[in-house]
Image (cartoon, rainbow, N blue to C red):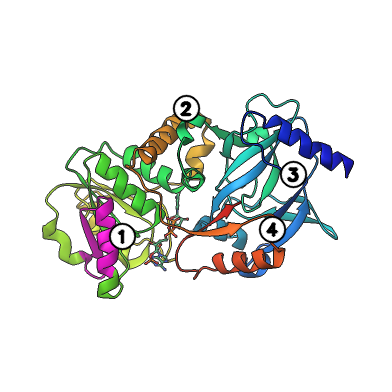
Amino acid sequence: MLAARSRLLRCAQQAVGQQVRWMSVDRAQMALYTETGDPTHVLRVAEVRLRKPAATDIVLRMLAAPVNPSDLNQIEGTYPVKGWFSEISCATQTVQAAVGGNEGVGEVVEVGSGVQSVRVGDWVVPRRSGQFGTWCTHTVVDSNSVDVVPREWRHGLDPLVVASLKVNPCTAYRMLRDFCKLQPGDFIVQNAANSGVGRSVVQMAREMDVRTVNVVRDRPDAEFELLADELKALGADIVVSDKKVAELKDAINGPVRLGFNCVGGRTTLAMTKLISKGGTLVTYGGMSRQPVTLPTSLLLFKDIAARGFWMNRWYLDDANSQEKMLMWRDILQMARDGRFAAQPMQRVQWSARMDVRDVQQHVCSVVAWDAGSKHAFVFE
Ligand SMILES: NC(=O)c1ccc[n+]([C@@H]2O[C@H](COP(=O)([O-])OP(=O)(O)OC[C@H]3O[C@@H](n4cnc5c(N)ncnc54)[C@H](OP(=O)(O)O)[C@@H]3O)[C@@H](O)[C@H]2O)c1
């Protein structure tokens, strides 16, 4: 008890000069799983005792963490990056468990005696997917497992913008740069254009004077019009239902250099037919769970290249570490200038003071595949 109190005091003392926050840093609520499977069945919220921080550790108070499709795949056990299972002390037992979530931002509330690179008050994001879970109120992690977001870059930004920076906006940023040199006036075509990546592509392409053809799943007319208006307000040039892609051919008056595929199946085939000779189809997601099938003629007579992109792989390459910071700076600058809006997400408030049974209910409803819109945990 005494040890916990003195840590509490130390935490507040270290925060002198910044806003002092009183909190217990020896306990947390976490959404964890002891085995992979349907997230609504295997994920449970538990009150846990945080491990004692080692000299190189830092203690984080999580600020925000989105729920991404890849997080659900990871909990299901179908994602190539596995959850990080470790010993976690719950109220009555110690379990081998992984904490859900790979993206998020936490504020550093305590640093170990050997930590040089991170300060109390810093905002940090996980360096790699699968290194620790972000769906928790607090956590203790190695200081080498995080990247610090410089204070001037995050200034004035909603933590949720920073929390959802690393995956979707960065995927869009890279795909627009790494496959060909797009020129002003060029077109790109993409499906799932209303997804997190899709909306980022629209806004970043607009900044590059690149025009976008945006395919979304068919829906009732009124709903389609609303969505089309929303995407056009972000900068989309053409928005079309996946049932009407073939009708578009004459509406595109410039070279379509790239196609971004997040879906697979028939939609992807229809979209690929719009890509100009010598262009590239980049697959980054498989939401329909259908394979990508391309007719021989597209490869033979139009020389369409089919490539893949995985943001995780890009981050694993240490040669990209400097470029990574430049990319984050660019995107956060765009967000601060009002040139980039993060994907709309439903905020699910989570406080360490809430009853775990209530949190459990919220968590279960937002991790269901049919949860509807995108969600993010926002921690008090
Ligand atoms: N390769 C990478 O590095 C990378 C990076 C980021 C994301 N991703 C992948 O990209 C995908 C989207 O992620 P996100 O975070 O952008 O998701 P998101 O914001 O939740 O958007 C999901 C999108 O998928 C569409 N969709 C859902 N189920 C579908 C189905 N059965 N058939 C066709 N479309 C469907 C949705 O359309 P409706 O609105 O019509 O439901 C929506 O456009 C995921 O597979 C994710 O793993 C990959």
Kindly identify which residue carries mark 2.
322
Kindly identify which residue carries mark 3.
25
**Along the horizontal axis of the image, is 75 left or right of 150?**
right
Give 303 or 19, whichever is nearer the viewer. Answer: 19
Give 333 or 314, whichever is nearer the viewer. Answer: 333
Q: CA distance from mark 3 to mark 1?
A: 54 Å
Residue at (85%, 59%) from the top-left corner?
93
Identity, as a three-letter code, of the amino acid under mark 2: Gln
Give 181 or 63, whichever is nearer the viewer. Answer: 63
**Along the horizontal axis of the image, is 343 left or right of 76?**
left
Residue at (46%, 68%) from the top-left corner?
372
Q: CA distance from mark 2 to mark 1?
A: 36 Å
Identity, as a three-letter code, of the amino acid under mark 1: Leu
Identity, as a three-letter code, of the amino acid under mark 3: Val
Vertically, is 365 above or below 279?
Answer: below
Q: CA distance from mark 1 to mark 4?
A: 40 Å
Of the image marks 4 and 2, the number of the one nearer the N terminus:
4
* Circle 3 or circle 1, nearest the eye: 3
As drawn, the label of residue 32 is 4
* Circle 3 or circle 2, nearest the eye: 3
Q: Are marks 4 and 3 in contact (CB under 8 Å)?
A: no
Identity, as a three-letter code, of the amino acid under mark 4: Leu
Extreme residue in the bottom direction: 220
Where residue 206 sits in the image (x, y, percent)? 25, 44
What's drawn in magenta, residue-wise? 224-245
Q: CA distance from mark 3 to mark 2?
A: 33 Å
Of the image marks 4 and 3, the number of the one nearer the N terminus:
3
